[in-house]
Image (cartoon, rainbow, N blue to C red):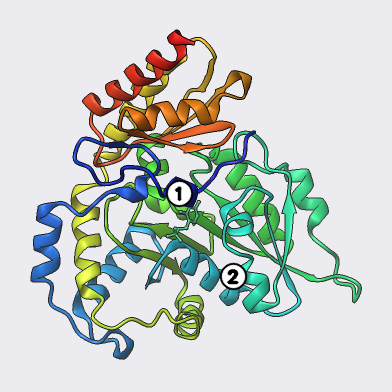
Amino acid sequence: MSTVSYGSAQAAAPVGAPDVVDLRSDTVTRPTAPMRAAMAAATVGDDVFGDDPTVNALQARVAALLGKEEALFMASGTQSNLCALLSHCGRGDEYIAGNLAHCYRYEGGGGAVLGGIQPQPLPQQADGTLLVADIAAAIKPDDEHFARSRLLCLENTWNGNVLPAAFVEEATALAHGRGLSTHLDGARFFNAAVASGVAPRELARHFDSVSVCFSKGLGAPVGSMLVGSRELIKRARRVRKMVGGGMRQVGVLAAAVDHALTHHVERLADDHALAARLAHGLSGLPGLRVKMPQTNIVFVDVEGGRGEALLEHLRSRGVLATGLIGLRFVTHLDVDAAGVDRAIAAAREFCERT
Ligand SMILES: *Cc1c(COP(=O)(O)O)cnc(C)c1O
């Protein structure tokens, strides 16, 4: 499995030009005109005082959707996972996560930096699961030599893979049986729900808390949410304030998210279909090894160490992707079939020429 670069190295790309096909991430979407209109019309108040009716309504909507007591608006997915870690765990506690999990590898070690929480990474399998035997062996006995095993974190989707339901059930049952809590990093939770046809509350059922992002495939400019029990969210609210996430007239952002939940969830199926179209188009090309996507992320290994050259060629044709050895293409709201076909044509030009 090749290491994924999460973006900053691509800053020199011709970003934002109208004819650019930007497949670097589903975070690049820009709010649509109706979303902007909803934002402009939002009724707002000071959310640190609990006064913002739009964010209050959205929190209630998302909590109900995921079948949990409460939800809390967050500035980002990283902040949401951090608040979850710091709400579930105290100093000297430990959380178990995949060694390629976002909350372990890509969030600056925030749990350790700010909470004195020790991560216990386990080998991530190719489908995003962990071996249940590994989890069982990693949970430490109550002994003064050890950190206190407190939390199991899973991620769905992971690298665009939908976590197998049987694994989720087994792993979370094991964790709960040994006295741990469970957290799901669901940055692309709704992609998993749409791809699997499983209701959000069912996908969330085995977890004590779930973090969902609205700024990825759902197309909102900003925003994530942590959902869980009333007691957990009360703790998270305190932590969120401490890490600078107490925002004021948040309704402007919540209105965008509310619009996205109404209009942009079902259509994630379109992104998944476009990712499949891209994967099929690329899979016939010499020198490329393409992994068939389950959702909206396509990984491509380029033979002969020519990944960067392919990226450069694509960029010269107005197609942006990320990666170093393996390339990553992500479909989203602002990409259509014509754009995907342009990406395929540009890759074909490179692969067949050389
Ligand atoms: C993007 C992402 C996050 C963090 O979201 P930000 O809003 O970028 O902080 C967390 N987990 C996963 C799996 C992600 O893909």
- Tell which tag, 1 or 2, sits nearer the viewer: 2
Judge the density around disc 1: few (<14), some (14-19), many (≥20) Cα neighbours within 10 Å. many
Could one spot residue 293 in this view of the protein?
Answer: no
Task: Determine which quarter of the picture holds residue 26.
Answer: top left
Q: What residue type is disc 1 on?
A: Leu
- Across and down, in percent, residue 334 comes to 24, 41
Task: Determine which quarter of the picture holds residue 24.
Answer: top left
Vertical side of 295 occupied by 73: above or below: below
Q: Quadrant of the N terminus?
A: top right
> Which numbered dot is residue 187?
none
- Across and down, in percent, residue 69 comes to 40, 71
Who's the residue at 64% across and 66% down the image? 109
Residue at the disc numbered 2: 85
Who's the residue at 72% across and 41% down the image? 131
Left of 236 or right of it: where is 29?
Answer: left
Residue at disc 2, secondary structure: helix
Left of 127 or right of it: where is 275?
Answer: left
Alpha carbons under labels 1 and 2: distance apart: 20 Å
Residue at the disc numbered 1: 203
Judge the density around disc 2: few (<14), some (14-19), many (≥20) Cα neighbours within 10 Å. many
Pointer 1 with pointer 2, Cβ within 8 A: no
Query: Along the line of sight, which residue is nearer the eye, 232 or 321?
Result: 321
Who's the residue at 36% across and 37% down the image? 23
Task: Determine which quarter of the picture holds residue 118.
Answer: bottom right
Left of 115 or right of it: where is 331?
Answer: left
Could one spot residue 345 in this view of the protein?
Answer: yes
Sequence-first disc among 1 and 2: 2
Check mark 2 vs ligand 1: CB closer than 8 Å? yes or no. Answer: no
- Across and down, in percent, residue 327 comes to 51, 32
Q: What residue type is disc 2 on?
A: Leu
Vertical side of 198 occupied by 117: above or below: below
